[in-house]
Amino acid sequence: MTTTFQVEVSREAENDVREIHNYIARDKKNAAANWVRKFQRKAQSLSYLPMRYEVVPEADSINRPWRHLGFGPYRIIYRVDGNRVRILRVIHGARLLDQEFFERLDRHGD
């Protein structure tokens, strides 16, 4: 029997999604709405087998269990706690993650 995980989106990740939507909507309103729908489906897909995605390489080096899921040019960063998946951030894939980024996740990841 497969365990179903509850997926939650942090306030920071909700802000990220809103900002990405607004950026896309400047040129293409329909594409922006479509992107949000795809994000919601991708996020909900984490309710099944969330451990199938790798630990964020930068987080692994500092021994943090955060994982990421590629979504177009973006990365959905999340962690698994028991039967809960918490989406922490949605960032552009080219963004470099530094120590400060992870410290903010530690402080605001709940």
Image (cartoon, rainbow, N blue to C red):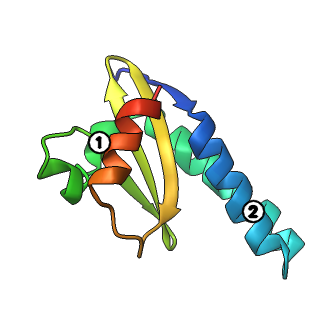
Q: Work out whether 23 lies above or below 47.
A: below
Q: Amino acid at mark 2?
A: His
Q: Is residue 14 left or right of residue 5?
A: right
Q: Are marks 1 and 2 in contact (CB under 8 Å)?
A: no
Q: Nearer the viewer, residue 27 or 11?
A: 11
Residue closest to the eye, 59 or 108: 108
Residue 58 image position (x, y, % from top left)? 21, 58
Q: Which residue is mark 1?
A: 66
Q: From the viewer's perspective, is 2 left or right of 28? A: left
Residue drawn where x is 13% and y is 41% of the image: 63
Q: Residue furthest right?
A: 29
Q: Secondary structure at mark 2?
A: helix
**Where's residue 54, x and y in %?**
24, 52
Q: Locate residue 9 relative to residue 63 in the image: left or right.
A: right
Q: Residue at x 47, y 32 (%)?
A: 108
Q: Quadrant of residue 26?
A: bottom right
Of mark 1 and mark 2, the one earlier in the sequence is 2
- The CA span between labels 1 and 2 is 24 Å
Q: Amino acid at mark 1?
A: Trp
Q: Is residue 97 above or below residue 72?
A: above
| Residue lying at 33% horizontally and 62% vertically, measured from the top left | 97
Residue 79 lies, in percent from the top left, at 35, 35
Q: Is residue 75 left or right of residue 12?
A: left
Mark 2 lies on residue: 21
Residue 37 position within the rendered picture, expressed as x and y whole percent measured from the top left: 72, 53
Q: Under tag 1, what secondary structure?
A: loop
Q: Quadrant of the N terminus?
A: top left
Q: For the point 71% across and 59% down, which residue is it?
A: 19
Front-most of 69 and 63? 63
Are there few (<14), some (14-19), or many (20+) residues within 10 Å of tag 1? many
